[in-house]
Image (tube, rainbow, N blue to C red):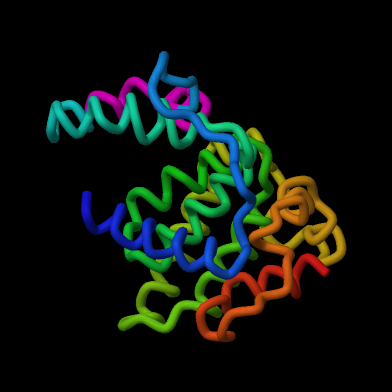
Amino acid sequence: MSAGYGPALKAFLVLKGAGKLPESSPGKVGGLPGDAWKKVYKNRADRVQQIMHEADETLHDWMLLHAYGDVMSSPGLDLAQKELLMVSFLAVSDMPDQLFGHILAAVQNGNTMAQVKHTIDIAFECYQGPDKLKHQEESEKILERAGSHPDCQRYAPETMLEKSKEELLHSRSLEKLQEVPLLTKKPTTPPREHKMQRRLSEVLA
């Protein structure tokens, strides 16, 4: 858990200090769990839940109640936007199985394959970790496999390359990212700390 919470806390402190976060932001902690789990996994929800439960019962409960019941169900970004952020993270983190599932979820919740591919491309432009080329090639294979999956074709039958750049930049999910101050405000901190932010801002301009 510390591998996720530690970097998250550091990122929030840096962004808060740079004036990139609002005084308060909508969120959900506790209470009845939200319905993000069903919305993300749809007809695969029960099967994924079973796999998680067999792996570890406690982790299963935490994922359903907190990760999806609170975090993914929080107001603010819509689920399509959250899934674009999720696939960009999974691609550079070398998690092909999870990437495949969340590409399907991204498309089923309002994105096109062109948007998903473009988001992953941006992530790799900013990523400077080890085995970058290897992870990028693996992600491209996962994109192709997910694109041919019946669930993707049912929700987004167009191929990755059919949408022009203009259509992509004015499509619903990426256009809505312009409403998020974190992604659109001009960075005032050192350039290296906000490379992803600057790149997204250029794409959305």
Residue 25 counted in the magenta span: no
Bounds of the magenta span? 37-51
Left or right for 142, reference 21: left
In front of the other: 112 or 80: 80
Residue 107: % across, % down: 61, 42
Residue 155: % across, % down: 66, 35
- Which residue is pictured at 39% across the width and 80% down the height? 132
Q: Quadrant of residue 95?
A: bottom left
85 relative to 185, above or below: above
In front of the other: 197 or 39: 197
175 relative to 59, above or below: below
Left or right for 159, reference 74: right
Main SS of residues in magenta: helix
Residue 174: % across, % down: 73, 54
Q: Quadrant of residue 90?
A: bottom left
Residue 40 counted in the magenta span: yes
46 relative to 56, above or below: above
- Which residue is pictured at 65% across the width and 78% down the height? 188
In front of the other: 68 or 157: 68
